[in-house]
Amino acid sequence: MGLTRSTSIVFLLLALCPSAAGAREAAQPMGPLDPGDAAWAKKQPKAPARSAAPKKNRSNKPQQPPAPAVRRATAGPGAEPPPSPEPPELQALRQAERELFGTDDLLVPSDGCPPELLPDASNTLVFSTGLPPSSVAPRAQNTSPQPDYLSSLRMPDVPVKFTSRVVQYLDFYKNDSRGRAVAAIFYRKSGRFEPMLRSVLRHHGLPEDLMWVAVVESGLNPTIYSPVGAAGLWQFMPESGRLYGLVIDRWVDERLDPVRSTHAAAMYLQDLYRRFGTWELALGSYNMGYGGMLAALRKYNTNDFWELSRFEAGVPWETALYVPKILALAVVGKNPEVFGLANLTRDPPAEFDEVDVVPGVSLESVAKAAEVDVSDIGQLNPQLLASRIPPRAPTRAAAGVWTVRVPKGHGAKVEANLVQTRVAEPELVPYTVRHGESLADIAAAHGTTTQELSRHNALTSDEPIRPGLLLMVPPRRRASPTTEKIAVAVPVDLQPPAGYQRRFYQAVAGDTLQGVANALSVRVDDLIRWNGLDVRARLHPGMLLLTLLPATQTLSRVRLLSDDDVQVFVVGSDAFFDYHEAQKGRVRMVTVVQSGETWRSIAARTGLSLGMLERINQRSRSTPLQEGEKLVVYVPASKVAAQPKPAPQAKDPELSTPEPSESVSEDMPLVPPQDTQDSDTSVSAEPSEPLEVDSK
């Protein structure tokens, strides 16, 4: 797989360069390789602090497709779908390679492999390592006689040297029944993409027969994913695809777009050729990586791929076979009659019209406008992952539209009918998920349901809703004035000092203290102190965190609640307990222990369990009760008869015991509990240490 390992090694080596030097190199067009650049990279001292590149601010802005001059910048990979099954013809080819060139790790063909691709038990297998018997390779090539047919072959436009391995592949495709079957499958499939592949390669000034690289990489399956995350015809990894201008997110993966990915692959192959100067080295680098190839060239002091591939540890074994395999297929493609393919019916070329469609339109609307089935649109546009045009156009599109392919002859219908078919669609607008928002929050704010949002955005049940995620939602509706306030418990009722505002952040799944602190531009220590948190414990979804933020700070990317949205209760206050017990239809009271009463008898007459009675009073049931002492109990509101409250008395609140504000029947002597805290729970928000809020 061409980019499975290659760019990772390239970027790792480039990361060793000082940032200033790396920036200068990135600003120049990619040119011939400087023989000393890797050694220079290792020996250069670290750049002084004043010349170091400034740290980049983390941003939720969509990534810009990089210009060719800065292709060495890296981008973070996104989530990847599970790997796809390897095509049977590629499995058979790998099996044959083990038989032709080595005996290790023989492949057992998978179920469903066509019979013509299975090994022929009647044939004698001759195993060879493909390496010389000594650790030093001789300079002379294999001098065994070459087949007569080689001299009459038409040659592809990529240079081919008939080395022993190239000839072995050609003999396999010509004389082995499995080889003929593999070549036939490749040749038949290539009919679908060959016109496009040759056109794009020609556009970039490259040999058109490089199209066979895509055959070896993916078996010409544009939607295939490898176990390590490479995807598409050319098996780009996410970071490599973004590097060459492909858009890759949850809405679109242009690695699966045959045309766009071929343009990206052409640029990458062009860069490799300009660096190394021969197509053998360029193709080997596509497979093993630029950095690995560069190191091998310096180690063995040669720029001849065929010599390098014969040395011990010269190149990976896969790469040693990768290059001759592609060149042999290019020869086969130029000579179908020699390899028994002349009468083969090839797949017809993919034909389509291209139309410009504005962001956010569903593929169903496009299909209706084109008067075709939606599956036809999906097959022509495998890069569209959510059955909808992405909510925002790529930055490369000056007109702010996406190019969509429709069956040949239906483009005019789309242009004529799309406006009318869109009328039947629900109105949707792009929306970027803020820090602290859940799908339920977004649905409530836009007057819809989570099920509808999932349907509009092709969300799976286990897909996380992360900050920065772009969704299509109904236009925001005005909040209902009767919306119930959210109850929030705080250790102390902090009030903001001058120049600050009090806000509340509701945690969502996956939140961390550091992540919330970063989003709010505050310190983790402040969050812990304001909310009485344990830095070692997790934040649980639904927790509300009190924050004090500068009044001038705008946080449009974070979902915050103001005092108008919440009802604040100090933990342990009367109001706190009254609110929470009222939600359960109960009243918090104090009962006075009567003569002869026990834990069990009090539990029985209050309707509480012994365990709950222990939990409320933080005492063990094994401790004896004394007549006249008081216990806190929670009783059903229906058992409490409301009585007029006595006028408050001017007493020290810490020494006074409130008179009962409610009473129950005589067989249940209860009085309201005394609050253990001062009645005035509002305190100053001035921190014990200076409050620091980093502005971003």
Image (cartoon, rainbow, N blue to C red):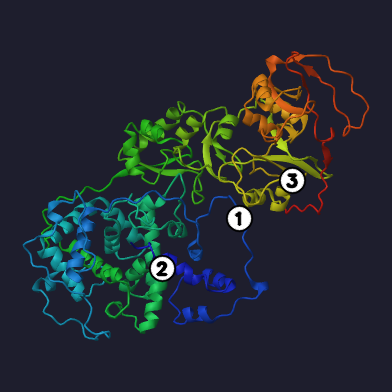
Tag 3–tag 2 contact (CB < 8 Å): no
| Identity of the residue drawn at 84% across and 32% down | 679
Earlier in the chain: of badge 1 and badge 3, it is 1
Q: Quadrant of the N terminus?
A: bottom left
Q: Secondary structure at mark 1?
A: loop
x%, y% of residue 109?
20, 55
Q: Which residue was labeled with disc 1? A: 58
Seen in the image, is 588 located left or right of residue 373? Answer: right
Left or right: residue 331 versus residue 563 is: left
Give the x, y percent position of residue 645. Answer: 84, 17
Q: Earlier in the sequence, mark 3 or mark 2?
A: 2
Residue type (three-letter) at the residue carrying disc 2? Asp
Q: Residue furthest right?
A: 650
At label 3, which amino acid type do we have? Trp
Q: Nearer the viewer, residue 411 or 530?
A: 530
Vertical order, 374 against 278 (above or below): above
- CA gap between label 3 and label 2 equals 55 Å
Residue 537 percent across, percent down from the top left: 62, 48
In the picture of the structure, the residue carrying the numbered disc 3 is 530
Q: Does residue 675 sit above or below 602 in this rendering?
A: below
Horizontal arrangement in the rendering, residue 153 relative to residue 473 (left or right): left
Q: On residue 271, which mark appears? A: 2
Q: In the image, is residue 580 above or below residue 172?
A: above
